[in-house]
Image: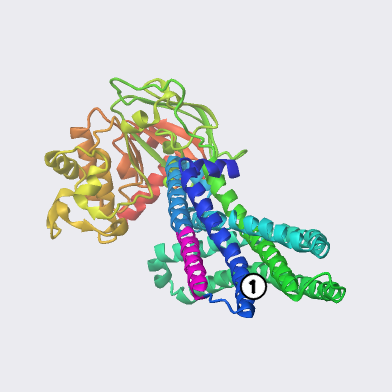
């Protein structure tokens, strides 16, 4: 994992080095100042006894100490600045890489991560890694350096007393190892709880209208409270573990200090040490222990970062299951012929949503698909632009398996109006131009006229320049559907797939849209999924699906003769009309 993440530090190692250098400068100045002060103290006492004038000496040393302090400060500031820049760049690159990866995800990949979890991973988890990097750059060099130098001084003053450090190290090591062992799963759980909060908030915000319509505000609030509560509990558990470390460390430190004073006193009584030496020794040993503590806290941060790092790597390592083949096929003059050959399909291993589907749609045909809800209509058409791959069998476009196509080239010749369609914030024109970024105004108007959208667009306050709110909320359901159809039509696709996309449009308008397929899109193969027989009645072929299998294929008249399911649907719909 470290190796993978270190990749994003490429070119930033110079900054990391500068940051370490700054820290070393600061540490040296910090260690030198007390020793100089000690020396001044000794010289001044000696001078006082001999009656020498030392004003100039004090000013000189004072200035030197001031200079040293400023130098140390400069080192510290450099580290701050450089480590911030390095970690910001690191997180920027990491986020960018993740975002690019997620953009390349297939529908199936997206199904495995929830959007809320992806959001947490892109934001919270990356920020955690960024903070850890800053901490690493600021502590990693400084703490070990101070530790080693202080330990060296301590041992040079009195090696026997300093041996206490050797005794303490394994004890501290065991405590830290235990905390890390129990801490990691806690931190991982904590990130999951953050996912959960994001999910609750996202669902609530996206579905706020439904929430209000069903007067579910109180329940939603409760859901949010319980999610926050769980996070808080998990957070305090983890924090509880971390805070227990502190008192234990303090206790150990105090034990050490008592030991030093006790043995120091014995040595002093025997005339082996003076009081000054004892206090300097104590301060160096405390310095060593403080830095061990810093390193332990840093290790805890690392454990938390490890949990986040794994989650980030999970995204980066996801194998995208729908990718371009080795020698992708790019069609010169696509015709739009679609053929299914013994296609089986499921969303997971052992799932059978579509079974043994075979049919052929010649170029320019209009194909209707009809069947009860949940029978697999959407799943079937999703296979044509390769939004999902078949489990077995083949889907052919112009005689070539869609898996051999260059994905972009394949999707370029297909216009899709998905069942769950969305518009984006921006003007109506911007939204239509999604289908074809270089479209001229005439082409836009032509597509909108064909989709029966032109008239209502002209009634909007700014016509084609009218701003749409997020998701096109300021339009009616039927208006939205017609814009989505126009967006797909403007591509002049060879294959046009309409998944239940006129369900909110009145029958008269729908008939007009259908007429434009016959008149203006003669060469386009149109696949219409519909609930109403009237929507598919004039199709060249109608596929009747039943529980993932083809029940019957034929035109309206043929099906009326020999397809029971079709007759049944027709009867119930006629009944509604006659009554
Ligand atoms: N399904 C699934 N995972 C998905 C989408 C669907 O497991 N990501 C399941 C739910 C259904 C079956 O697959 O049992 C077929 O779903 P379709 O969306 O293909 O069904 P229809 O499009 O025919 O239904 P509707 O008329 O309601 O749109
Ligand atoms: Mg559907």
- Local SS, label 1: helix
Check disc 1 and report the residue beneath it: 42
Tell me where the magenta segment starts and ends, as one range: 55-77
Count of numbered marks = 1
Observer-nearest of 225 and 25: 25
On the image, the x and y values in percent for residue 242 come to 67, 67
Residue 132: x and y, percent?
55, 56
Q: Which of 203 and 415 is in front in this view?
A: 203
> Residue 251, relative to residue 453: is it above or below?
below
Q: Which quadrant of the figure has residue 189?
A: bottom right
User: How are the colours assigned in the image?
Assistant: rainbow
Is 58 within the magenta?
A: yes
Q: Does the stretch in magenta take in 103?
A: no
* Residue 375 appears in the figure: no
Most common secondary structure along the magenta stretch: helix
Res. 538 image quadrant: top left
Q: Is the residue 191 above or below the residue 338 in the image?
A: below
Q: Which of 40 and 221 is in front in this view?
A: 40
């Amino acid at each position: 994992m470290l190796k993978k993440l270190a990749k994003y530090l490429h070119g930033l190692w110079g900054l990391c080095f500068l940051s370490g250098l700054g820290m070393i400068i600061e540490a040296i100045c910090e260690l030198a100042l007390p020793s100089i002060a000690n020396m001044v103290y000794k010289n001044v006492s000696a001078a006082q006894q001999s009656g020498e004038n030392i004003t100039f000496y004090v000013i000189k040393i004072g200035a030197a100490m001031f200079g040293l302090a400023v130098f140390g400060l400069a080192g510290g500031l450099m580290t701050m600045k450089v480590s911030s820049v390095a970690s910001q760049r690191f997180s920027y690159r990491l986020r960018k890489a993740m975002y690019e990866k997620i953009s390349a995800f297939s529908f199936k990949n997206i199904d495995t991560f929830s959007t809320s979890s992806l959001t947490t991973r892109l934001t919270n988890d990356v920020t955690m890694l960024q903070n850890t990097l800053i901490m690493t750059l600021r502590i990693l060099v400084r703490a070990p350096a101070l530790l080693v130098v202080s330990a060296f001084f301590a041992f040079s003053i009195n090696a026997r007393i300093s041996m206490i450090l050797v005794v303490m190290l394994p004890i501290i090591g065991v405590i830290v190892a235990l905390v890390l062992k129990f801490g990691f799963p806690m931190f991982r759980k904590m990130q999951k709880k953050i996912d959960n909060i994001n999910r609750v908030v996202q669902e609530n915000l996206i579905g706020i209208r439904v929430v209000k319509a069903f007067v579910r505000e109180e329940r939603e609030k409760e859901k949010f409270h319980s999610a926050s509560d769980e996070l808080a509990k998990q957070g305090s558990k983890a924090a509880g573990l971390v805070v227990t470390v502190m008192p234990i460390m303090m206790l150990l430190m105090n034990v050490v200090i008592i030991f030093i004073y006790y043995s120091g006193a014995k040595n002093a009584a025997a005339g082996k040490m003076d009081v000054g030496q004892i206090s300097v020794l104590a301060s160096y040993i405390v310095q060593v222990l403080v830095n061990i503590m810093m390193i332990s806290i840093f290790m805890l941060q690392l454990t938390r970062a490890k949990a986040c790092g794994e989650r980030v790597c999970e995204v980066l390592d996801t194998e995208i299951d729908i990718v371009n083949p080795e020698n992708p096929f790019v069609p010169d003059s696509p015709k739009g012929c679609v053929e299914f050959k013994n296609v089986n399909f499921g969303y997971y291993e052992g799932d059978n949503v579509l079974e043994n589907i075979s049919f052929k749609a010649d170029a320019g045909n209009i194909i209707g698909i009809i069947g009860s809800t949940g029978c697999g209509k959407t799943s079937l058409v999703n296979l044509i632009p390769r939004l999902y791959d078949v489990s077995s069998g083949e889907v052919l476009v112009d005689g070539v398996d869609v898996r051999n196509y260059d994905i972009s080239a394949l999707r370029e010749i297909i216009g899709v109006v998905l069942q769950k369609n969305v518009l984006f914030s921006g003007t109506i024109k911007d939204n239509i131009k999604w289908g074809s970024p270089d479209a001229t105004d005439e082409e836009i108007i032509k597509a909108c006229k064909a989709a029966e959208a032109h008239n209502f667009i002209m009634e909007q306050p700014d016509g084609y320049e009218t701003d749409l709110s997020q998701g096109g909320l300021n339009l009616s359901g039927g208006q939205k559907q017609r814009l989505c159809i126009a967006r797909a039509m403007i591509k002049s696709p060879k294959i046009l797939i309409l998944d239940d996309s006129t369900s909110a449009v009145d029958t008269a308008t729908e008939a007009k849209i259908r007429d434009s397929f016959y008149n203006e899109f003669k060469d386009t193969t149109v696949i219409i999924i519909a609930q109403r027989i009237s929507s598919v009645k004039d199709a060249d072929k109608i596929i009747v699906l039943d529980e993932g299998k083809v029940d019957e294929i034929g035109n309206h008249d043929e099906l009326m003769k020999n397809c029971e399911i079709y007759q049944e649907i027709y009867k119930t719909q006629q009944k509604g009309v006659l009554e």
